[in-house]
Amino acid sequence: MSKRINLLAVCGSGTVTSSMVAGEIQDELSDDGYTVKATEARPTEAKQLIDSGKFDLVVYTSPLPKADYGVPVINGTGLLTGIGEDEFWEELKKTVAGISGKA
């Protein structure tokens, strides 16, 4: 049985970039046995969505409002620029391994 992760992908418009990032994460983590359910959002929507309690993790490419999100928050800009991409995947996989026990 695969492990489920509920991901909130955040970008400036809440559509194009976050969809691309979510798709890359879904593809990469599926190879590791995860099922990723992704929701895209704008930074201004993130805190309210996280407060719903439905998400395990936030990956963002646009700055988020300062807040305590209560879940791991990872900067996904490396997926767009290629700079720091390896570090992003390393941090993501380590984080997901730590939270997958909740699934």
Image (cartoon, grey):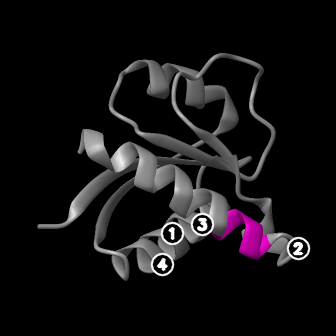
Q: Earlier in the sequence, mark 2 or mark 1?
A: 1
Left or right side of 9 for 37: left
Disc 2: which residue: 83
Specify the amino acid type for callout 2.
Ile
> How far separated are the C-alphas under marks 4 and 1?
5 Å
Left or right side of 46 for 99: left
Disc 4: which residue: 28
User: Marks 3 and 2: in contact by CB < 8 Å?
Assistant: no
Q: Is residue 97 above or below residue 31?
A: above
Left or right side of 22 for 32: left
Disc 3: which residue: 21
Asked if residue 87 is among those painted magenta in the image, a careful observer would answer yes
Q: Earlier in the sequence, mark 2 or mark 3?
A: 3
> How far separated are the C-alphas under marks 1 and 3?
6 Å
Res 85 → quadrant: bottom right
Res 99 → quadrant: top left
Mark 4: secondary structure: helix
User: Marks 1 and 4: in contact by CB < 8 Å?
Assistant: yes
Mark identifier at residue 25: 1
Q: Earlier in the sequence, mark 4 or mark 2?
A: 4
Disc 4 packing (10 Å; few <14; some 14–19; many ≥20)? some
Quarter containing the N terminus: bottom left
Residue closer to the observer: 72 or 39: 72
In the image, which residues are magenta?
A: 85-89
As drawn, which residue projects farthest toward the left? 1
Disc 2 packing (10 Å; few <14; some 14–19; many ≥20)? few
Left or right side of 81 for 59: left
